[in-house]
Image (spheres, rainbow, N blue to C red):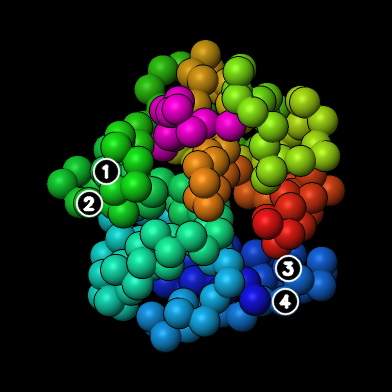
């Protein structure tokens, strides 16, 4: 059963609707007890990094989430849910993320329009092994983005996007940890395939 963590994210309903359309068993959880029963966890997210991390702490769910991840439960972070994996974000200086990736999320700076909104192409990171999350997708796939901050390229980056000359992590994969900057629930057939791949891990 997939647990979709509800901390007040605006895209919770669209994520659960996408899972329902695909007939993927899931339930919405709001506490540590709900997480404890999960065989997979999705952390959706839109909005502000600080708001998300403060909400997780107010729910007293940060340690339970980390415990499930360290126990090997497959985890999928979506958009802001990807940012949560990092130590910090320029969006909320001084506020700690989950710290599973030793780096900081950064703000787009340049002549590009911010937020990065709409469809863009992602490509496999050069030299990275085959991705279980992006399995059966074309090498170049278009997905839907909506964000003002981005994750830099990391050793665990599996897919890359270029926006305004900035190459950032479109997807991260490390052992049981998976995350995407884009919104699979808004990315048509490609997004459906990604959700099915995650459910099949």
In this rendering, which labeled residue sits more in front, label 4 or label 1?
A: 4
Q: In the figure, 146 relative to 24: above or below? A: above
Whether 129 is drawn above or below 190: the answer is above
Between residues 34 and 104, which one lies in front from this camera angle? 34
Question: How far apart are the alpha carbons under marks 3 and 2?
Answer: 30 Å
Quick one: SS at disc 4? loop
Q: Which mark is on residue 33?
A: none
Residue at the limit of the structure toward the left, as seen here: 94
Q: Position of residue 106 (x, y in %)?
A: 35, 32
The mark found on residue 88 in the picture is 1
Residue 16 belongs to magenta span? no
Q: Mark 3: few, some, or many residues within 10 Å (few <14, many ≥20)?
A: many
- Give the residue at x 46% y 47%: 82
Report the disc number at residue 19.
3
Q: Earlier in the sequence, mark 3 or mark 2?
A: 3
Q: Residue shown at 61%/17% (left/top)?
A: 126
Residue at mark 2: 96
Residue 1 lies, in percent from the top left, at: 65, 76
Displayed quadrant of residue 61:
bottom left
Asked if disc 2 and disc 1 are in contact, CB closer than 8 Å, the reply is yes
Element type at marker 3?
Answer: helix
Helix, strand or loop under label 2:
loop
């Amino acid at each position: 059963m997939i647990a979709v963590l509800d901390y007040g994210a605006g895209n919770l309903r669209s994520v659960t609707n996408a899972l329902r359309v695909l007939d993927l068993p899931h339930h919405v959880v709001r506490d540590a007890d709900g997480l404890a029963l999960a065989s997979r966890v999705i952390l959706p997210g839109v909005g502000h990094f600080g708001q998300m991390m403060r909400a997780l702490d107010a729910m007293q769910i940060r340690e339970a989430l980390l415990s499930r991840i360290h126990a090997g439960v497959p985890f999928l972070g979506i958009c802001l849910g990807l940012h949560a994996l990092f130590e910090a974000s320029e969006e909320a200086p001084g506020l700690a993320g989950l710290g599973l990736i030793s780096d900081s999320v950064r703000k787009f700076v340049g002549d590009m329009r911010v937020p990065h909104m709409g469809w863009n192409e992602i490509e496999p990171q050069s030299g990275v092994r085959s991705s279980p999350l992006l399995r059966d997708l074309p090498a170049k796939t278009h997905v839907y983005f909506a964000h003002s901050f981005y994750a830099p390229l990391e050793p665990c980056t599996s897919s890359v996007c270029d926006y305004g000359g900035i190459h950032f992590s479109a997807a991260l994969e490390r052992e049981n940890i998976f995350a995407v900057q884009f919104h699979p629930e808004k990315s048509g057939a490609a997004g459906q395939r990604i959700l099915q791949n995650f459910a099949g891990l």
